[in-house]
Image: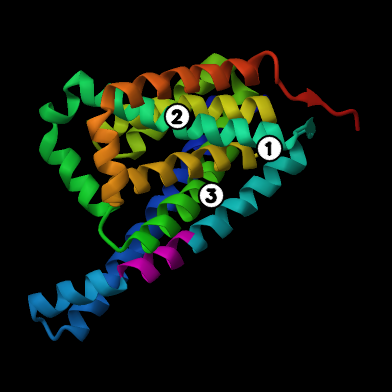
Amino acid sequence: MRSDSWAMRIWKLFYPLLIHFSVSVLFSIIFTTVALALGGGNLEDTLRLAVEYNFPVTMIADVIVLLILLYFFRKDSLRLMPVKMKITPFHWILIAVCGISCCLAANYLISLSGLIQLFYEQYEEVSSLLYYGNIWQELILMAVAAPVLEEVLFRGLIFRRLRTYCTFPAAVLVSALLFGAYHGNVVQGVYGFLMGAALAFMYERFRTIWAPILFHAAANLISVIVTEVPQVSNLADSHALAVMVIAIIAALGTIYLIQNNCRPKEVSP
């Protein structure tokens, strides 16, 4: 990949995003057309059908995109020299704890920054789309489907390809910027950038796509729980400062351990 022209490099970075966008738009058009037909042109019936079948349609679209991306991920893997790391159960625990603490720390810091107030309408619009269904649908979409699909896309393809073109810091910066932009608004964009940098770090240290997938799944899981479970939400809000301080310490501590004392070691082939 290092011998690719700049045009080819840019194409290789962006066509996975185009695939995701194209399939999503295509399914959205088909879904809207079918909903309009079944609703008989009645807006109320069309909206009811859109809400009722949004979950299965989204899942089908995500599976199709994932299968396509996995094909290219596999092709890339065949071209690159595999690096196997010795990953213990303790490492997986560190990754999950780091994902949870980074999610909480980033959200609380963004809340303190005032960004939500500045871009409140955009933030609420996206939040309503993310947390639209029952909690089980949200858990499946956000804690399972989204982490797998987005990690194969952004870390498995985009970040890994960037690593063949440039240094680690540059690859982290570019992939995190793309991941932030992917979220579509300023507030989630800043959150996506911060988490994208952490996810790239996880992939770099563990050299397996399962590391950022677990990190991402743990982060989204705690986000759904804090948002949708009133007891947890009330507890987090009433002790916001304590939660933020603990989350920041836990995030920095787990990252330090992964980088230094508990850094996984390469396994000889």
Q: Mark 1 points at which residue?
A: 208
What residue is pinned by disc 2?
101
Q: Identify the element where label 2 is drawn.
A: helix
Residue at 60 percent across and 30 percent down: it is: 94
Q: What stretch is highlighted in magenta?
A: 54-62
Residue occupying image coordinates x 16% and y 76%: 46
Image quadrant in which you'd find residue 187: top left
Q: In this view, does 77 lie to the left or right of 16?
A: right
In this view, the residue in front, 257 or 232, is 232
Q: Tag 1 or tag 2, which sits nearer the N-term? A: 2
Q: Residues within 10 Å of mark 2 (few under 14, many from 20)?
A: many
Residue 247 picture location, percent across and down: 41, 24
Q: Which residue is drawn at 70% across and 20% down?
A: 262
Q: How many numbered tags mark residues here?
A: 3
* Visible residue check, residue 17: yes
Task: Count residues near mark 3 (Cα–Cα under 10 Å), then give few for <14, some for 14-19, many for 20+.
Answer: many
For the point 21% across and 85% down, which residue is it?
A: 38
Residue 226 versus residue 136 in the image, above or below: above
